[in-house]
Structure formats: structure tokens, C-alpha cells
Image: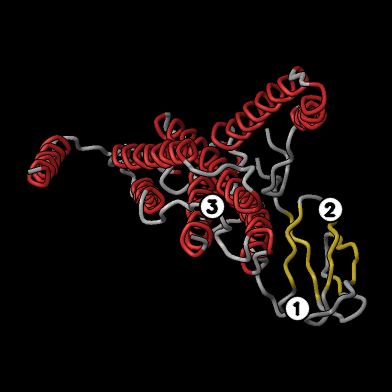
């Protein structure tokens, strides 16, 4: 008997749910009461999510794009000022990083392996 | 306005680490004072300070993450690593008590009668309340997973119901275990059997209470619309912790209740 009562309760709930929910037509993404990031994310989290959606990465969350490092295809280094520190791993698994300042203007070469690096100016994200 | 070019959270200065440290000092010294001089003042002070610290520290984290948006994807990833590392440390904590149990029970000494359970100990029947407890915790693992899927699919009502059910099952376990403790024919003072049994199951019970509390906070936050369908790490952390508590029980049940009977 308990089983039959449980079954009846379940089917009644299901019927009620579908009859109550159908008329509720929402234009927002929240269909059943829990907000989405699109609706509720705020602050820096919102800015990062919006930027990533547009294919941009102003906060350097993703791995940098891969470049050949040649004169025709230099490593593009985003920067907010006139110079930025670059650490070059000349070969994979190298433990000694070659550090140097990359200045705006013409592309510079790594003093060790000669890869080309070019500073590209970006606005400070805010 | 934000002037950082990275996605990490540079936390503002906070007094809670200091109050937490002072609270820990009062708790430890208070414990020693209580044991020797039967005075609970320091202990009580330490407990109050610790509870206040936990409340305010975690409230601040909720403010920083949910209300101010500091928990970007990289920050969330760090929090995930943190929770996993913490749970791993808890695994090692319990590993110690299992080591003690197996050390005592695999080669029982002559003082115990050379057998396990030791002479004079009537162990609890593993197929009575302990088996029910196992079913209760396993069911709660199902309901918490149900709650997670409800959140991810945006079903508010289902999420609240399944999360509430999980917490109720947790309370049921604690209630049943308390009854078992009261009715048990042996005590913690009954040799190494009593020690290993009550310390291992006792710490597990404490972790059930902690896990239930964590889930209850998540229920409150869910009702208050804190979680989104994509970002609800507080809930995930609570669910991970709850599954860990469940797994520890399974090991306890198999080792101490069943094999050890």
C-alpha cells in the first residue's frame, strides 16, 4: 500500500509540475530557478568570462599562442607598458631560462637561441 | 576599478588568521588546563574564538567570490587543488587509525586471549544497525549527486529538495550512531578493541557532523541564489567531502565492524 501511495504521489507531482511550469515562459536563460553565469557573474569573474566568450584573453588565463619565432612569424608578446620581461625556454625541457627586457618597437632576438619577439601594446583591462 | 592584468585574487588583509591562531592556542592550552585542573574557561574561550573565526572567514570568502566576483576560473582551479589536498590529508589522518586497528587485530597479544575480537568483547552485529548506516550513507551519496546534477541543469526546486534529503540522511546516520554508542556493550576503556573502535568511528562521526554542516551551509546558499549552473564550487567541495566521509565509513564497516567481529 505504501508503494501505491508513493507512486500516486510521484505521478501527481509530475502532473502538477508540468501544468504549473508550462505557462511560465521566461526569456532569460534561467528556466527552472537557478541563475546562469551570464545573468549573475560579477566583477573580475564576469570580465574574464565575457572576454573569453569574445575570443579575447586580457588576463592571460590561457596558454600563450604558439609562434614559430622567426623574423616573419615572431612571438607576439602583449604588454601594457613600453617594456616587458620575457623568459625564453630556448629548447623544450631547458632548466635555464633566458630572461631579457623586451622593448616596444622592432622585434628583438633572444640572446641565446635567436628567436624573435615583438612587443604589442594592449590597453590595461578595466 | 581593477588595475591588475592577471586573473588571480590578491586578498585584502584580514584579521581572521590571527584570531584563528589565538583560538587554536587557547584550545590546546585550554585542553591541558582542563585535564589537569578541571577548569573549562580557556577551552570555552578557545572554542568561541574558533567558531567566530570560521564563521567570519568563510563569510568573507563568500563575499569575495559570489558578491565581488574575485573567483575567476584560475582562482577556482586553485580552490579545487586546495580542497583535494585537504581531503588527501584527511585520508592520511584516518589511515593512521586503520593502521592502529590492523596492528592490534592481525596479531592479537596474549593479554587479549590471542584472539580477535578479544576475550570478553561482544562486538556489534554488523548486519544490524551498522548495515543500515551503510545503506543510509550510500543513499546520501546518491542524493548529493542528484543535487549536483539538479544545480547544473538549473532545477532550483529539485536541487533544494535533494540537498535537504542528503542532510536529513546525514542526521539520521548521526542519530543511529549515537544510539549505537549508547547501547554498546563495550566502552572506549575496554582495551585496544575499545580504543580502536571508538577513536576510529568517533572521528568518523565528527567528520559526518562537519560534512552535514558544510552541506547545510550550501543549502542555505542555494536557497539564497548564490550558485549558478556553471559556478558552484562551494557545493562541489561539500559533495567531495561528503563522498570522502562515505568512503571512510565503507572502510570502517568492512574492517572493524565486519572483518573485526
Residue B20 position by quadrant: top right
Q: Specify the label residue A69 is tagged with.
A: 1
Q: Is residue B239 left or right of residue B38?
A: left
The quadrant in which residue B222 appears is top left
User: Disc 2 to disc 1, how far (Cα)?
Assistant: 21 Å
Q: Residues within 10 Å of mark 2 (few under 14, many from 20)?
A: few
Q: Mark 2 — residue?
A: A82
| Residue B100, horizontal then vertical, whole percent | 68, 59
Give the CA distance from mark 1 to mark 3: 75 Å
The numbered dot on residue B121 is 3
Tell me if residue B74 can be seen.
Answer: no
| Labels 1 and 3 in the same subunit | no
Disc 3 chain ID = B
Name which residue lies at 52% across and 51% down: B245
Dot in front, 1 or 3: 3
What residue is at 55 percent from the left and 50 percent from the top? A51
Across and down, in percent, residue B125 comes to 41, 54
Q: Is residue B117 above or below residue B160?
A: below
Q: For mark 2, give the secondary structure.
A: loop
Amino acid at each position: 500500500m505504501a508503494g501505491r501511495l508513493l507512486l500516486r504521489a510521484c505521478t501527481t507531482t509530475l502532473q502538477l509540475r508540468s501544468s504549473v511550469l508550462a505557462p511560465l515562459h521566461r526569456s532569460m536563460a534561467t528556466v527552472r530557478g537557478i541563475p546562469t553565469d551570464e545573468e549573475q557573474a560579477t566583477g573580475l569573474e564576469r570580465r574574464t568570462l565575457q572576454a573569453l566568450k569574445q575570443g579575447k584573453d586580457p588576463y592571460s588565463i590561457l596558454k600563450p599562442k604558439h609562434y614559430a619565432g622567426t623574423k616573419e612569424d615572431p612571438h607576439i608578446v602583449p604588454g601594457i607598458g613600453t617594456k616587458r620581461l620575457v623568459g625564453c625556454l630556448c629548447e623544450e625541457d631547458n632548466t635555464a631560462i633566458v630572461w631579457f627586457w623586451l622593448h616596444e618597437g622592432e622585434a628583438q632576438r633572444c640572446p641565446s637561441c635567436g628567436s624573435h619577439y615583438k612587443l604589442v601594446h594592449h590597453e590595461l583591462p578595466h | 576599478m581593477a588595475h591588475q592584468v592577471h586573473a588571480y585574487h590578491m586578498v585584502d588583509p584580514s584579521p581572521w588568521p590571527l584570531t584563528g591562531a589565538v583560538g587554536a592556542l587557547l584550545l590546546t592550552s585550554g585542553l591541558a588546563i582542563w585535564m589537569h585542573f578541571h577548569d573549562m574557561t580557556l577551552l570555552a574561550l578557545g572554542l568561541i574564538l574558533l567558531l567566530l573565526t570560521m564563521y567570519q572567514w568563510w563569510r568573507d570568502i563568500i563575499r569575495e567570490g559570489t558578491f565581488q566576483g574575485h573567483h575567476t576560473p584560475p582562482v577556482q582551479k586553485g580552490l579545487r587543488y586546495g580542497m583535494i589536498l585537504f581531503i588527501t590529508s584527511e585520508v592520511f589522518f584516518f589511515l593512521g587509525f586503520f593502521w592502529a586497528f590492523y596492528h592490534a587485530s592481525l596479531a592479537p597479544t596474549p593479554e587479549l586471549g590471542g584472539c580477535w575480537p578479544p576475550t570478553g568483547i561482544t562486538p556489534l552485529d554488523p548486519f544490524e544497525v551498522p548495515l543500515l548506516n551503510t545503506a543510509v550513507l550510500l543513499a546520501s551519496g546518491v542524493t548529493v549527486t542528484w543535487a549536483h546534477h539538479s544545480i547544473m541543469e538549473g532545477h532550483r526546486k529539485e536541487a533544494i529538495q535533494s540537498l535537504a534529503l542528503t542532510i536529513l540522511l546525514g542526521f539520521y546516520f548521526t542519530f543511529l550512531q549515537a544510539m549505537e554508542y549508547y547501547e554498546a556493550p563495550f566502552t572506549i576503556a575496554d582495551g585496544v578493541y575499545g580504543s580502536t573502535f571508538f577513536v576510529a568511528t568517533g572521528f568518523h562521526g565528527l567528520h559526518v557532523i562537519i560534512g552535514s554542516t558544510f552541506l547545510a551551509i550550501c543549502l542555505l546558499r542555494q536557497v539564497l541564489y548564490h550558485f549558478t549552473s556553471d559556478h558552484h564550487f562551494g557545493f562541489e567541495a561539500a559533495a567531495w567531502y561528503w563522498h570522502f566521509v562515505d568512503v571512510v565509513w565503507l572502510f570502517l564497516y568492512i574492517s572493524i565492524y565486519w572483518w573485526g567481529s
